[in-house]
């Protein structure tokens, strides 16, 4: 059974069609990624999943329950880590967890036990009595994530969990999320960090302008849509261009940089570096970022 | 705009109240000071400084010292201020900067419960302030008992009414600095012209009619009537005014906040 089933979901703000009929499903125990550039409709989608934003059309089912009928039960069983810090600055780290548990009608005793577990798991034990205002961005995120788990949810929803974090905090968070996934937790994740999606997501969709562009397993999508590897050539000259024109390959011209998508082997790369020029030529494996940019374009957003 | 339905409100409303109470408890020593000290300052200033110039006045056909006359008004004003400032500045900060409502909306709570819980808490602050002030004023011998015991339910009712008015402002203002407008145009005139510091009869006829529209006028009349045991039939009308206004404004405040927040 699917943990989350989204069908033909729509939302418009006046003229702006934020979500234009998207459908996807999250299976039990998997980490599902919702990828897209800023303004693609990711957060709007997430907000519709827990009734924060009313949808215009479409069907939403979580745990087999209809969102219109069983919103309370659904909200009791999901954990949501919002994009913006919404920790309670009037309370300590510990009280943020225990206080939040009250909204789920969790008994005091159980809340204390759960809070202790989560503080331990997220290495926040020594900061339990601290006020929120003295925490760094990374600690706040960890606490946000801990808070989203206080009700022991069946589905964890993360809206850009690592945006704005330093590499150390990001690595730690990824590690913790991987552990949670290993314990069988189902996760829905939005991000625009490809490394994050590659590392955590079993399956993903890339959305842009409110529509799903592709869906699948990250490695498979990259192989199918981009290729095996990418040859990057910095400052290409006439000789390089002429050489590539004579070879059967896909070239993307960015002006002062050429990207050549290769399906297998390093024949072309070897030939180029041996016969034309080696300087500024790099061969690297194709990644999700290549696919993402290919699908959503290279122009700046917002 | 959608009016809240009773079926949308559950016991979870009290969790919001509880959240604010927990925060309040951390600093209760400081929160307790104004209601304890304020009446003493006013009674000192008015009772010692101004009352000698005013002397006795006639109220409802009985002679009354000026200090006794204003003591119930001080409690009424505190009921208004505590609730109104809680659901304006404090609620706005929680909604806009602290994202407290966003966090709560990710739990089984719904927005209707959050807003109602906020208003219940604001009314609770009014009750706390009115109780503390009444104790101080009673110790000065200015209130009559058992009549003054009615101040507790009156503080709750008045608190709810002004909490709803404040929440309506919060639902409508674009930014926090705009609260100056309802305060300057509504709260301050009420503070001065609701039979607080002089009897309404001193006003010209038209102004008396305007004053009858103000909620604080009716709260002051009820609080003064109870605390000094000046019973009159017009108090029933004032009570009816407060009940009807609260019954309309409370759901209106919820509906307007839902309209503001839900996008």
Image (spheres, coloured by chain):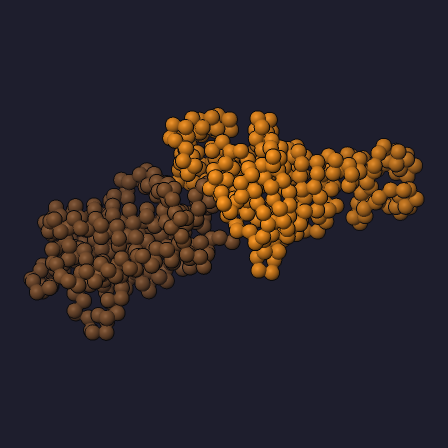
Chain colours: A orange, B brown
Pick the residue in front: B258 or B247: B247
> As drawn, which residue projects farthest toward the left?
B63
Give the mark count. 0
Q: Position of residue A135 (x, y in %)?
A: 47, 36
Q: Position of residue A224 (x, y in %)?
A: 78, 38
Quadrant in the picture for the N terminus of chain A: top right
Q: Is residue B207 left or right of residue A267?
A: left
Q: Position of residue A187 (x, y in %)?
A: 58, 35
Q: Is residue B142 visible?
A: yes
Q: Is residue A130 visible?
A: no
Q: Position of residue B25 (x, y in %)?
A: 31, 38
Pick the residue in front: A78 or A144: A78
Q: Residue at x 34, y 58 (%)?
A: B249
Residue A236, relative to residue A286: is it above or below? below
Q: Residue at x 66, y 39 (%)?
A: A204
**Figure quadrant of residue A198:** top right
Q: Residue at x 45, y 28 (%)?
A: A114
Pick the residue in front: A182 or A292: A182
Residue B42, relative to residue A192: is it above or below? below
Q: Is residue A278 left or right of residue B233?
A: right
């Amino acid at each position: 059974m699917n943990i989350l089933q989204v069908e033909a979901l729509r939302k418009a703000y006046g003229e702006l069609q934020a979500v234009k009929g998207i459908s996807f499903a999250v299976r039990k125990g998997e980490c599902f990624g919702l990828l897209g550039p800023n303004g693609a409709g990711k957060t709007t989608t997430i907000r519709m999943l827990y009734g924060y934003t009313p949808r215009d059309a479409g069907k939403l089912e979580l745990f087999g329950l209809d969102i219109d009928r069983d919103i309370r039960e659904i909200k009791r069983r999901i954990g949501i880590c919002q994009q913006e810090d919404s920790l309670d600055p009037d309370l300590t780290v510990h009280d943020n967890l225990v206080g939040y548990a009250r909204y789920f009608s969790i008994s005091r005793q159980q809340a204390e036990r759960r809070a202790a577990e989560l503080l331990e798991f997220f290495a926040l034990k020594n900061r339990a009595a601290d006020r929120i205002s003295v925490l760094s961005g990374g600690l706040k995120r960890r606490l946000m994530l801990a808070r989203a788990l206080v009700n022991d949810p069946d589905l964890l929803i993360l809206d850009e969990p690592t945006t704005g974090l330093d590499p150390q905090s990001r690595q730690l968070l990824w590690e913790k999320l991987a552990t949670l996934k290993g314990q069988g937790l189902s996760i829905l994740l939005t991000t625009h960090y490809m490394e994050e999606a590659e590392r955590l997501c079993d399956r993903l969709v890339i959305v842009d302008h409110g529509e799903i562009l592709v869906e699948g397993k990250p490695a498979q999508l990259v192989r199918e849509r981009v290729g095996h590897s990418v040859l990057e050539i910095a400052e290409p000259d006439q000789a390089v261009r002429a050489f590539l024109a004579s070879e059967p390959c896909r070239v993307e011209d960015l002006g002062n940089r050429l990207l050549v998508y290769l399906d297998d082997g390093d024949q072309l790369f070897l030939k180029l570096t041996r016969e034309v020029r080696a300087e500024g030529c790099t061969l690297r494996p194709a990644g999700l970022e290549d696919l993402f940019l290919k699908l959503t374009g290279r122009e700046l957003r917002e | 705009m959608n009016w809240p339905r009773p079926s949308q409100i559950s016991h979870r409303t009290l969790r919001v109240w509880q959240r604010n109470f927990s925060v309040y408890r951390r600093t209760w020593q400081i929160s307790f000071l104004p209601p304890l000290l304020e009446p003493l300052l006013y009674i000192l200033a008015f009772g010692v400084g101004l009352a000698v110039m005013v002397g006795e006045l006639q109220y409802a056909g009985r002679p009354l010292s000026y200090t006794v006359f204003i003591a119930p008004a001080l409690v009424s004003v505190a009921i208004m201020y505590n609730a109104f400032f809680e659901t304006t500045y404090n609620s706005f900060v929680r909604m806009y900067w602290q994202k407290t409502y966003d966090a709560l909306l990710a739990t089984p709570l719904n927005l209707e419960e959050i807003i109602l819980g906020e208003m219940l808490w604001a009314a609770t602050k009014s009750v706390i302030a009115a109780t503390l002030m009444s104790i101080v004023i009673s110790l000065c011998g200015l209130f009559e008992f058992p009549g003054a015991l009615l101040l507790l339910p009156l503080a709750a009712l008045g608190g709810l009414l002004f909490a709803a008015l404040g929440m309506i402002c919060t639902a409508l203002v674009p930014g926090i600095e705009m609260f100056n407008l309802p305060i300057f145009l509504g709260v301050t005139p009420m503070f001065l012209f609701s039979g607080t510091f002089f009897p309404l009869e001193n006003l010209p006829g038209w102004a008396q009619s305007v004053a009858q529209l103000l909620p604080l006028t009716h709260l002051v009349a009820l609080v003064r009537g109870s605390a000094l045991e000046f019973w009159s039939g017009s108090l029933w009308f004032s009570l009816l005014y407060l009940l009807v206004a609260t019954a309309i404004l409370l759901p209106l405040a919820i509906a307007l906040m839902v309209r503001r927040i839900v996008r």
